[in-house]
């Protein structure tokens, strides 16, 4: 196929220039939605465009500025520094005074700026000298200065739907046919592979089309096997440095808690195939073993720790099976959050009663000062009694709360309930004597 340099890069050539050409994000761009209202009113406000790669953040921000008719400047947070920002901020006063409009300042990948750099925007945004339009793939709640974030409207973009991706693919193929003698076409099965591979990312889709065009022979439509060969290794669509990591590990945790084996295994392997560090997952599995299973099945913690040790011994990919074993065991184990609830309760109580001293009868008289205060006086060694317990007071007088740990009714915690009842009965009988 004869290539033309004016075809590439497709993602740039096909970038929409007007709102009418933009595809997807109907919740923002549809009739009577926020973007339409801003364009029609020509009254922009400072905003953050947040969403995965290839969903139209940069394109939509540029369209807004263009169609609203604001003077604008743009730069990328990945290459610009604080000195350049301050110069731009000072220059923003010109448009404000001359055109009676603030400068629309577009900042791509704004999450790459640290908090101190972000602070430089704050006074200019507050005064209205600048309309700040930032894009980010990271959750603004974690990556954007809170004071600045309170003055920005967040527009969240989502992965593109299959219909949007098919329209973008059709537009790309039509663009190529107009400019290349042999054109390019896909079989329906090949189209499905291209759409699936893109994972809601238009840039990924167009980049794949480019590669296929550069490698395919002119003639019949490109088939599924050819596209799969171009792709070679599947891409899981997983960002282990961003929100994906926390959303997926949360999905795994909640699936285990809900005793849903299929869902738990699904999220486990989504993370593994995405390149997540298995030890990161194992650390969370160990936590689940106590938070959601606890003493309902004490073997859960032992199995998870054994899985960690075995994985460190063998490594991936063979060692991934240990994670699967631990995940299945946790999902099917009897559930109890009694220890988790006790943990939250005890932290508050420990803070509330932090000034209460240890009762003198259980203080070791290991120095003359403690002994002089009566430390150890009245101490009873439980093993000296046939019941193996005593009525010795071990709780400070000021603590009135009781029943810190309340075991559940599943698994081994049924036994724990019986044990607690046994010791209570023994002590009650000793009080009667």
Image: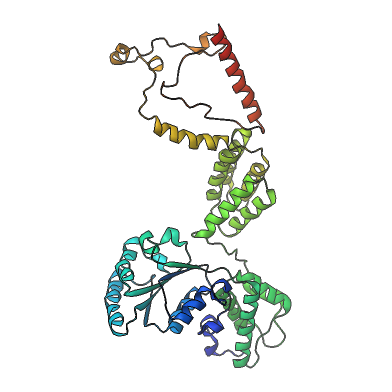
* Image position of 83 with respect to 317: above or below: below
Q: Residue placed at 65% from the left, 89% from the top?
A: 183
**Numbered disc total:** 0
* Image position of 232 with respect to 361: above or below: below
Q: Position of residue 231 (x, y in %)?
A: 62, 72
Quarter containing the C terminus:
top right
Residue 374 shows in this picture = yes
- Left or right of 300? Residue 75 is left
Residue 63 shows in this picture = no
Q: Which colour scheme is used?
A: rainbow
Q: In which quarter of the image is residue 417?
A: top right
Q: Residue placed at 37% from the left, 25% from the top?
A: 356
Question: Going by the picture, which residue comes out furthest to the top?
Answer: 433
Quarter containing the N terminus:
bottom right
- Left or right of 35? Residue 69 is left
Q: Residue 282 or 100: which is nearer the viewer? A: 100
Q: Residue placed at 54% from the left, 74% from the top?
A: 33
Q: Where is residue 423 in the image (x, y as percent from the top left)?
A: 58, 18
Q: Quadrant of residue 224?
A: bottom right
* Image position of 407 with respect to 36: above or below: above
Q: Position of residue 267 (x, y in %)?
A: 62, 54
Q: Where is residue 351 in the image (x, y as percent from the top left)?
A: 40, 34
């Amino acid at each position: 196929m004869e290539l033309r340099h004016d075809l590439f890069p497709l993602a740039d050539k096909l970038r929409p220039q007007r709102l009418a050409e933009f595809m997807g994000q109907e919740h923002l761009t549809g009739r009577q939605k926020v973007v339409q209202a801003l364009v029609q009113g020509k009254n922009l406000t400072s905003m953050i465009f947040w969403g995965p790669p290839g969903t139209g953040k940069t394109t939509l921000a540029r369209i807004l500025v263009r169609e609203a008719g604001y003077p604008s400047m743009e730069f990328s947070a990945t290459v610009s520094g604080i000195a350049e920002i301050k110069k731009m901020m000072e220059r923003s006063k010109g448009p404000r005074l001359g055109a009676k409009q603030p400068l629309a300042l577009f900042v791509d990948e704004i999450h790459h700026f640290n908090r101190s750099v972000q602070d430089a925007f704050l006074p200019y945004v507050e005064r209205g000298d600048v309309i700040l339009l930032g894009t980010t793939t990271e959750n603004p709640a974690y990556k954007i200065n809170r004071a600045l974030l309170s003055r920005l409207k967040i527009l969240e973009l989502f992965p593109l739907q299959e219909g949007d991706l098919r329209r973008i693919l059709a537009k790309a193929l039509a663009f190529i046919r107009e400019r290349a003698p042999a054109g390019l076409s896909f079989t329906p099965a090949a189209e499905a592979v291209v759409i699936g591979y893109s994972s809601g990312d238009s840039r990924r889709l167009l980049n794949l089309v480019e590669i296929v065009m550069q490698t395919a022979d002119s003639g019949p439509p490109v088939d599924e096997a050819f596209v799969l060969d171009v792709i070679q290794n599947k891409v899981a669509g997983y960002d282990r440095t961003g929100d994906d990591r926390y959303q997926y590990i949360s999905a795994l945790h909640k699936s285990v808690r809900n005793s849903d084996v299929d869902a738990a295994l699904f999220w486990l392997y989504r993370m593994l195939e995405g390149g997540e560090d298995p030890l990161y997952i194992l650390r969370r599995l160990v936590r689940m073993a106590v938070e959601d299973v606890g003493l309902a099945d004490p073997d859960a913690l032992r199995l998870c720790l054994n899985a960690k040790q075995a994985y460190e011994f063998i490594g991936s990919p063979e060692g991934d099976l240990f994670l699967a074993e631990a995940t299945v065991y946790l999902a099917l184990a009897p559930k109890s959050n009694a220890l988790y609830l006790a943990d939250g309760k005890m932290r508050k109580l420990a803070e509330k009663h932090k000034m209460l001293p240890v009762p003198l009868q259980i203080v070791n008289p290991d120095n003359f000062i403690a002994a002089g205060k009566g430390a150890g006086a009245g101490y009873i060694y439980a093993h000296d009694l046939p019941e193996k317990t005593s009525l010795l007071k071990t709780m400070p007088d000021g603590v009135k709360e009781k029943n810190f740990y309340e075991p559940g009714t599943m698994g081994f915690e049924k036994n724990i309930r019986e044990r607690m009842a046994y010791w209570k009965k023994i002590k009650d009988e000793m009080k009667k004597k």
